[in-house]
Image (cartoon, helix red, strand yellow):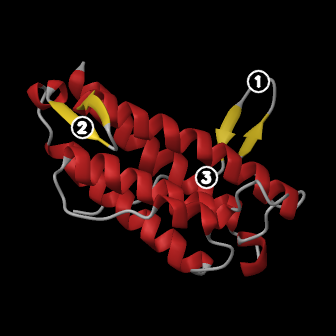
Amino acid sequence: MSQRFLTASRNFLLDDYLPKIRIAMAPLSEADLWWRPNPSSNSIGNLLLHIDGNARQWILGGVGGHAGTRDRDGEFGAVVGATKAELLASLATTFHEIDRLLLRLSDAQLDEARVIQGAHTTVFDAIYHVVEHISHHTGQIIQLAKWRAPGAVRLYDATSESFTPLWSPEPRQT
């Protein structure tokens, strides 16, 4: 069951969330990337910085022991910044690093205790947290993209009899 959990986690990141984010961002301009519906909301750029920072802190740092620093306030405070291509490349790099790390984890390691961002957790719970967290923000990115590019973001070919994703899984890096 542990290996099924790890495989599912890897697949959500590279076969579901990253392709959906790519599709949602494709029709957007660079200005759309940093648009906020109001001053207290986040832009797609903020959400991409946040997903990347959170995943690096919790999985690569907290689970994998990789050194790194995070500027969480900067993730949400940015009003301009990296380009669409740069943000997508960084996120893809992070997801591929996580993929390789999860591939190496053993069943026993999932029960190991960690303290991440001040939270007492286990490796299993840290992975679950990040996968769920990214799902939430992926939905926000899709919604913002649909507001900025009405009719241009299409993820599925769906009828009452069929449901077909319009993307391919992210190629795995070795």
Of residues 19 and 135, the one nearer the viewer is: 135
Q: Residue at x 45, y 41 (%)?
A: 12
- Which one is closest to the eye, mark 1 or mark 2? 2
Which residue is rendered at x = 21% and y = 62% of the image?
174
Task: Identify the residue position indicated by label 3 in the image.
Answer: 20
Relative to the observer, which residue lies in front, 98 or 7?
A: 98
Question: Which of these two is toward me, 1 or 60?
Answer: 60
Q: Which residue is mark 2?
A: 115
Provide the secondary structure element on which disc 1 rests: loop
x and y, in percent, of residue 134 in the image: 51, 44
For badge 3, the amino acid type reads: Lys
Q: Amino acid at mark 1?
A: Glu
Q: Is residue 142 left or right of residue 174?
A: right
Q: Amino acid at mark 2?
A: Val
Disc 3 or disc 1, which is closer to the eye?
3
Determine the residue positioned at 52% across, 57% down.
50
**Is label 3 in a helix, a strand or a loop?**
helix
- Counting residues from the N terminus, which is met first, the one under dot 3 or under dot 2? 3
